[in-house]
């Protein structure tokens, strides 16, 4: 599907995956390291899903308050990292479910939006966000089964069309992106058929059944890596906090367990296909004569640094090391939006920071020198 381009694809983009508060905290490590390397301030687009959208939302609303020295932000910790750490000490999902269930006038999705507004991003609107970088919050349309991109310039479902310059709370965009089904979704967005502009190839443009109300669920149902809106950028950094797929020696015989297992298999297959396609496309583009160089750096929470394939992919020299007993459990931490302890937070941030450092300095040219100390020193991984 072709849509008019509004971003410079020769620059760098960042994708922040889903995975609840586990993802939010892992991505904080990514943001810290990219800032230290002088790359965060130069990003052209930041695409996010679910827990990644919680981190991206706070970064987006605070972007204009960030102060730079050279190409690094000096107050990122105060304006973005610490408020998000405080937010991840709270119980979000249980409160949203309880309040939404008890209220005769509000839904669970409404209460989730209220929590994000009251306790994190305030009443900021999409139109208050900076033009660059572009922040894209990804959700899934339960009606069309397609990705919905929510950003300052437009809200898009390519089967319906686009709403230009949408008047929407940032909190609502975060809630739609992180509305984990079936408990927290749907998050609904009211609109009018007259709000929509047509795009080439739409099926439902002008159809009132699809254009009066959007019923949205977690963006991870369609694209848990948030890649679809950034996969053609010349430089792409992906922070993936999705749990690695686990094998089981014996199959379940209960139908509900089998159904969940089949869903896990389908979800893992979709994620792996997107990752393999990105690697293949990067190699293909770089093999073409007179084609600009493309670079793709992936920091995945389940990376096993003792595995030869991973070691080759992340081959940068490093002055810090990690102990498997400390990092292996991190990929299996819950994806709930419930309180994370200081230790859980510290280790997840350090792990995201560490893997981002390895991925960027291995895969991207002239990325900088290896670090020598942990961003959360009280919970080191070595």
Image (cartoon, helix red, strand yellow):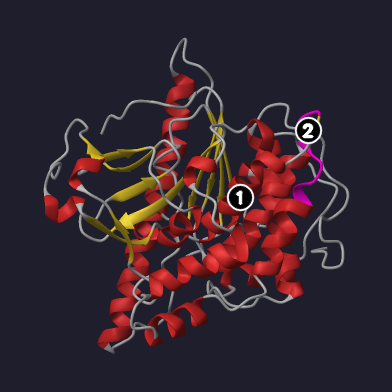
Residue stretch in magenta: 70-77
Question: 98 or 137: nearer the eye?
Answer: 98
**Residue 348 is at least partly visible in this image:** no
* Residue at the (50%, 48%) spot, across then down: 125
Residue matched to label 1: 310
- Check the image and name the residue furthest to the top: 290
**Residue 290 is at least partly visible in this image:** yes
Q: CA distance from mark 1 to mark 2?
A: 21 Å
What numbered label is drawn on residue 368?
Answer: 2
> Is 77 placed left or right of 60 in the picture?
right
* Residue at the (77%, 35%) spot, across then down: 72
> Is 351 placed left or right of 116 in the picture?
right
Q: Position of residue 223 (x, y in %)?
A: 38, 52
Residue 71 on the magenta segment: yes
Q: Can you say which quadrant of the picture contains the N terminus?
A: top left
Q: Earlier in the sequence, mark 1 or mark 2?
A: 1
Element under label 2? loop
Question: 132 or 165: nearer the eye?
Answer: 165
> In the picture, residue 44 is in which quadrant?
top right
Element under label 1? helix
């Amino acid at each position: 599907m072709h849509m008019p381009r509004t971003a410079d694809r020769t620059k760098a983009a960042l994708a922040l995956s889903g995975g609840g508060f586990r993802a939010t905290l892992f991505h904080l490590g990514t943001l810290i390291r990219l800032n230290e390397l002088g790359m965060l301030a130069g990003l052209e687009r930041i695409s996010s899903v679910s827990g990644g959208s919680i981190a991206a939302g706070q970064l987006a609303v605070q972007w204009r308050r960030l102060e730079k020295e050279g190409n690094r932000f000096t107050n990122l910790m105060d304006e973005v990292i610490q408020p998000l750490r405080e937010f991840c000490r709270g119980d979000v999902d249980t409160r949203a479910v309880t309040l939404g269930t008890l209220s005769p006038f509000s839904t669970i999705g409404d209460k989730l939006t209220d929590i994000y507004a009251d306790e994190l991003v305030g009443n900021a609107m999409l139109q208050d966000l900076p033009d660059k970088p572009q922040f894209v919050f990804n959700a899934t349309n339960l009606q069309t089964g397609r990705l919905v991109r929510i950003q300052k310039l437009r809200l898009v479902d390519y089967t319906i069309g686009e709403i230009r310059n949408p008047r929407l709370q940032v909190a609502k965009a975060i809630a739609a992106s992180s509305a984990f089904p079936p408990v927290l979704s749907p998050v609904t967005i009211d609109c009018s058929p007259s709000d929509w502009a047509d795009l080439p190839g739409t099926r439902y443009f002008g159809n009132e059944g699809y254009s009066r109300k959007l019923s949205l669920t977690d963006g991870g149902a369609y694209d848990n890596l948030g890649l679809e809106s950034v996969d053609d950028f010349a430089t792409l950094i992906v922070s993936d906090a999705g749990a690695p797929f686990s094998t089981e020696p014996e199959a379940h015989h209960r139908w509900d367990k089998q159904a969940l297992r089949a869903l896990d298999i389908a979800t893992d297959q979709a994620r792996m296909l997107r990752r393999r396609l990105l690697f293949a496309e990067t190699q293909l583009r770089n093999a073409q004569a007179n084609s600009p160089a493309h670079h793709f750096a992936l920091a995945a929470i389940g990376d096993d640094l003792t595995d030869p394939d991973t070691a080759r992919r992340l081959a940068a020299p490093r002055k810090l090391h990690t102990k498997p007993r400390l990092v292996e459990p991190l990929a299996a931490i819950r994806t709930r939006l419930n309180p994370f302890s200081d230790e859980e937070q510290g280790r997840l941030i350090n792990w995201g920071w560490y893997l981002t450092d390895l991925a960027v300095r291995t895969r991207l040219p002239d990325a900088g020198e290896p670090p020598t100390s942990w961003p959360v020193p009280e919970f080191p991984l070595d």
